[in-house]
Amino acid sequence: MTQDSLEPRVVPVLVPMPAEAPYSYQVPPGMTVVPGSVVRVPLGPREVAGIVWDGEGGGVDPRKLRPISAVFDCPPITERMRRFVEWVASYTLSAPGMVARMILRVPTAFDPEPPIDGLLFTATKPDRVTPARAKVLAMLAEDGGNLAWSRSGLAHAAGVSLTVIDGLAAQGVLKPVQIPAPALVPEPDPSYGAPQLTDGQRKAAEALKGKIGAEGFSVSLIDGVTGSGKTEVYFEAIAAALQKGKQVLVLVPEIALTQAFLDRFHDRFGAKPAEWHSDLAPRMRERVWRQVAEGRVRVVAGARSALFLPFKELGLIVVDEEHDPAYKQEDRVYYNARDMAVVQGRLGRFPVLLASATPSIESKVNAQSGRYHLVHLPARFAEAAMPSIEAVDMRRVPPARGQFLSPVLIDAVRGSVERGEQALLFLNRRGYAPLTLCRSCGHRFQCPQCSSWLVEHRFRGQLICHHCGHHEAKPEACPECGTFDHLVACGPGVERIAEEVDAAFPDARTLVLSSDLLGGTKRLRLELDAIAKGEADIVIGTQLVAKGHNFPGMTTVGVVDGDLGLANGDPRAAERTFQLLSQVTGRAGRTGKASRGLIQTYQPDHPVMRALVSGHAETFYHQEIAERQRGQLPPFGRLAAIIVSGETRAEAEGHARAMRRAAVAHDLIDILGPAEAPMAVVAGRHRFRLLLQGARNADMQGYLRMLLAASPKPRGSLRVQVDIDPQSFL
DNA sequence: AGCACGCCGACT
DNA sequence: GTCGGCGTGCTC
């Protein structure tokens, strides 16, 4: 970098596309860029935003070099963020440019927000002081005349019409000035609503505040049952970080449904955090991005993509519900935001807090091994009793023929309804019935694209594939043998349970909640509020009722098919079922009234059921971890590269994508040890390499079999070559 | 990822 | 005879 050289300087720039390395661009004379500068550069026929990277540019045919078009007036992407991009790219084996793209996916946030028009008091006397004018002048006198007002803000504050303001402005009493765009959210106040904590909570909060005070990287797992006050406790850590002048990121699985969280935050800090999620209006996205980069926004509550916001001085990340699968991104760059949050903490030397009532197995293991600091919260306060959980043995008290609710469950629901309380029936299956067959010829309706059964949605009159979204109208006659009226629905979905409930409780107000609900998140929010206000007696829902929503009147929770998640070949089947059923039965019992959770099961002795019924989660975790450890899944091991090839590029890409999806869906990454196991697909010419990590060749072959079994049936040719322990990635 | 170019099938 | 499908190659 010779400043006095006549040659224009050449710098590396990371552009938002899947190149393996930054591209080189000339810095035109008079332009200043530093590593991290956000720039506009020509790329092929278009212009894109890129990030000036570290090191030297060059090493490319000089005739190809093009100049940087412009530098945006925006704080440079920090060193921490640049190292993070490189780390994520290398861990997921995706192109650094694609990771950078996640930071830059904000169309026009790179230039400062335009200032807005304001009015300033000049102390000039108006010609006449009317009553309305007097009100305005009194308003202005109150702040000493030093503050700029917006035209409508002043009119509103003084209780006069806009014409009064305009009149004063015309006389020079108010003069127009430019004021900077207002802050999105008021600054949260760490001492606003400091809570009364129980002894256990205070101890936990002190431990976390110690981590904040100590500076440096650490990971703490806050583990405590629903209602033990995890949120209140980590709010204290947030307060401590804010007091130190740091920014805070709170990751939540699905921001769209976390209104309750935002309200609680407001109660504690006197202001709401800025929200960040994919449904945010573009204009809002830009403002949040910009103000986060400037450090004006102190706290962000966001979905996983918030991890790529350009925080100026991030000092704490909280990952709420750390076990939630929604933290996994399963397209383009495959990552688990929980693990990437840990990486950010390590790179930025600040603490990370993982919170969950039902932590993931790997976080438990990390806490046990001392890698993560365990903060355990004692059970919920005495006044909010834990629900009593029972297993309903379906072999002993089976439902009536053709029905799915055991008399035990029906009685419990009846009790609730008669007492004027609410009941929740949980079944994690949308639609009416998961399988339809012809009683005449045995034909089963299958998806033409991915060979799973088509789920009947009676309300819509359709057969739908829950895998790929394929749908067709439900025919009158069997497409195989042409027989009419012989199609029969097998098994229950929420719609069918609703039918059964309507028959058993014709006078009760029932409501079905599933992602099929027409009207989107808005409607869902309304329905949830309605339930909370007691406007339904019986709610029938899929897993979306399990997510952190409080129903104060809910005293009975019935799980229709407790075994549902246990049957498939998912290595996390037991863990997931335990987590889901814990959360769902935890919806009951927040009222102080006696409450029950009833789980219908054919396997009352299954470790998951025993743990749920006894309330001894630790027993379950111990068993599950022992089983994993006895198995073949140590955290560090050898690497296998699986090379998938096909006749055409598209075909090979398709195979690789399918396998990668399967690997992510089956958790082959984090089962193997979070933050250490690389898995990705590397594009070559008609060849893609997929990396897995395990201890022995046999494990690799096992994973491979699992991947192949889990991948949709490949079309065309699929050749798979397994290359154990490729040196290049060790 | 986006975009242009180029090569083969059904239509104004 | 052209429009348009996607398969391929390229971007400092």
Image (cartoon, coloured by chain):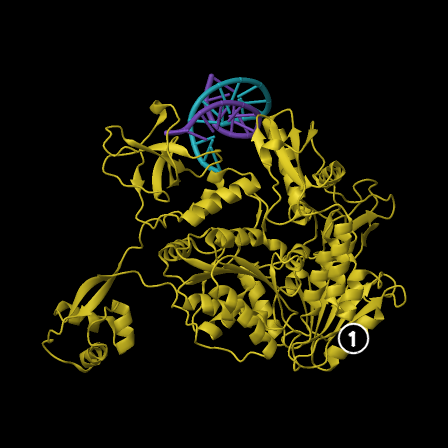
Chain colours: A yellow, B cyan, C purple
Q: Amino acid at mark 1?
A: Ala
Q: Is residue A481 left or right of residue A146?
A: right
Which residue, given by chain and number where applicable, does mark 1 sit on? A412
Seen at 56% across and 63% down, the residue is: A257
Give me the residue at 48% from left, 67% from top.
A238
| Vertical placement of residue A216 versus A487, above or below | below
Residue A15 visible somewhere in the drawing: yes
Image position of A679 with respect to A688: above or below: below
Q: Is residue A112 above or below residue A38?
A: below
* Quarter residue A653 falls in: top right
Split into 4 quadrants, where in the image is the C terminus of chain A? top right
A152 vs A85: above or below: below
Q: Position of residue A434 (x, y in %)?
A: 76, 52
Q: Quadrant of residue A678?
A: top right
Q: Residue furthest right?
A: A396
Q: Position of residue A703 (x, y in %)?
A: 72, 40
- Using a 10 Å C-alpha cutoff, classify the residue at mark 1 as few (fewer than 14 neighbours), some (14 to 19) or many (20 or more): some
Percent position of residue A390, x then y: 80, 71
Asked if residue A357 lies left or right of residue A108, the reply is right
Q: Tell me: A138 left or right of A622.
A: left
Q: Nearer the viewer, residue C10 or A704?
A: A704
Circle 1 sits in a helix, a strand or a loop, which is it? Answer: helix
Answer yes or no: is residue A540 visible: no
Q: Position of residue A465 (x, y in %)?
A: 69, 47
Q: Chain of mark 1?
A: A
Q: Nearer the viewer, residue B3 or A29?
A: A29
Decide which of A719, A84 is in the foreground and name it: A84
